[in-house]
Amino acid sequence: MTPTVDFNFYSTVYQGLADESTFNRALISASAQLVEITGEEIPQKHAKSWQLALCSLIEWETDGSKGVQSEHVGATSVTYSQEHATRCAIDNVRPYLAHTGLLYQGV
């Protein structure tokens, strides 16, 4: 069974920075990404780790700057920081799920 995260968990346990409406918009996408990485069957003993990983993805998705290092308006030019350009969803959830076996998708 896939654990759930509500705004109360996100704001009190994870201590996320997004407001509730931003959290709600990001929740669906972040949840879909995490289920794609881990699958839907999450053992109860790893539920809190999975919830924290989901909160990490929500935080990453709602980061207002998205790693923008510089931005020009005329002729539109945006430069992203190296860290954000090379970071992906798995990089965000690895600290929470590395010890669970949920990142292993092999046969």
Image: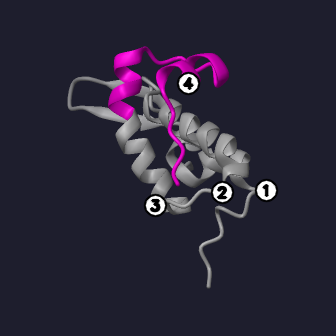
Please report the residue visible at 79 percent of the width from the left and 56 percent of the height from the top. Answer: 99
Label drawn at residue 89 = none
- Upstream in the sequence, badge 2 or badge 4? 4
Asked if the residue at tag 3 contacts the one at tag 1, i.e. Cβ–Cβ closer than 8 Å, the answer is no
Magenta-colored stretch includes residue 71: no
Dots 2, 3 in contact, CB < 8 A: no
Answer few, some or many: residues within 10 Å of disc 2's Cα (few below 14, many 20 plus, some between 14 and 19).
few
Q: Residue at x 62, y 85 (%)?
A: 107
Q: CA distance from mark 1 to mark 4?
A: 21 Å
**Disc 2 target residue:** 43
For marks 1 and 2, the one nearer the N-term is 2
Q: Secondary structure at mark 4?
A: helix
Element on which disc 3 rests: helix
Give the Cα distance between marks 1 and 3: 18 Å
Q: Which residue is mark 4?
A: 10
Residue 89, x across and y down, in percent: 52, 50
Which residues are the magenta region?
Answer: 1-26
The amino acid type, in three-letter code, at marker 1 is His
